[in-house]
Image (spheres, rainbow, N blue to C red):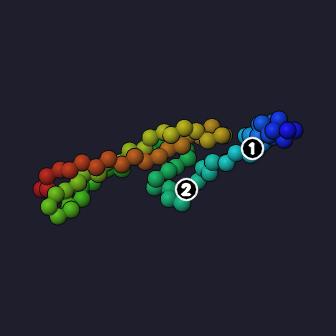
Amino acid sequence: MRLHHALPLLLATALLAGCAGNSISPRYTSENPDIMRISDERPANPEKTTEDLGSYCVEVSETWNAHGTTPDGQSLWAKDTARAVVPCD
């Protein structure tokens, strides 16, 4: 009977200990600086490009957008890519 009363207390203690432990630290680096950068200045957006895919063409436009800050206050920039089908010239 004692275990029946102590089980909820043990589960609550385990839950609190698990939540109080170290959390996963974010990594603010990237192997590819073409997709993510850390800087206070916004990176320049690349020019639009058109890719010929045979029977149709795709216009690719890329923009840098702020995605928060690092713990020391620097801006995180991530590159977003948009594609649109366009007629081939």
Choose between 5 and 69: the one closer to the eye. 5
Residue 25: percent from left, percent from top: 67, 48
Residue corresponding to mark 2: 30
User: For mark 1, does the 10 Å Cα neighbourhood hold few (<14), some (14 to 19), or many (20 or more) residues?
Assistant: few
**Which residue is drawn at the image coordinates 17% and 64% (left, top)?**
54
Inter-mark Cα distance, 2 to 1 = 29 Å
Task: Report if residue 65 is visible in the image.
Answer: yes
Kind of residue indicated by mark 1: Gly
Q: Is residue 29 left or right of residue 13?
A: left
Find the residue positioned furthest to the right.
2
Kind of residue indicated by mark 2: Ser
Choose between 78 and 8: the one closer to the eye. 8
Residue corresponding to mark 1: 18
Q: Secondary structure at mark 2?
A: loop
Disc number lying in front (2 or 1): 1
Choose between 21 and 54: the one closer to the eye. 21
Residue 67: percent from left, percent from top: 50, 40
Which quadrant would the N terminus be assigned to in this image? top right
Task: Report if residue 41 is visible in the image.
Answer: no
Q: Earlier in the sequence, mark 2 or mark 1?
A: 1
Rendered image quadrant of residue 51:
bottom left
**Which residue is drawn at the image coordinates 47% and 46% (left, top)?**
78
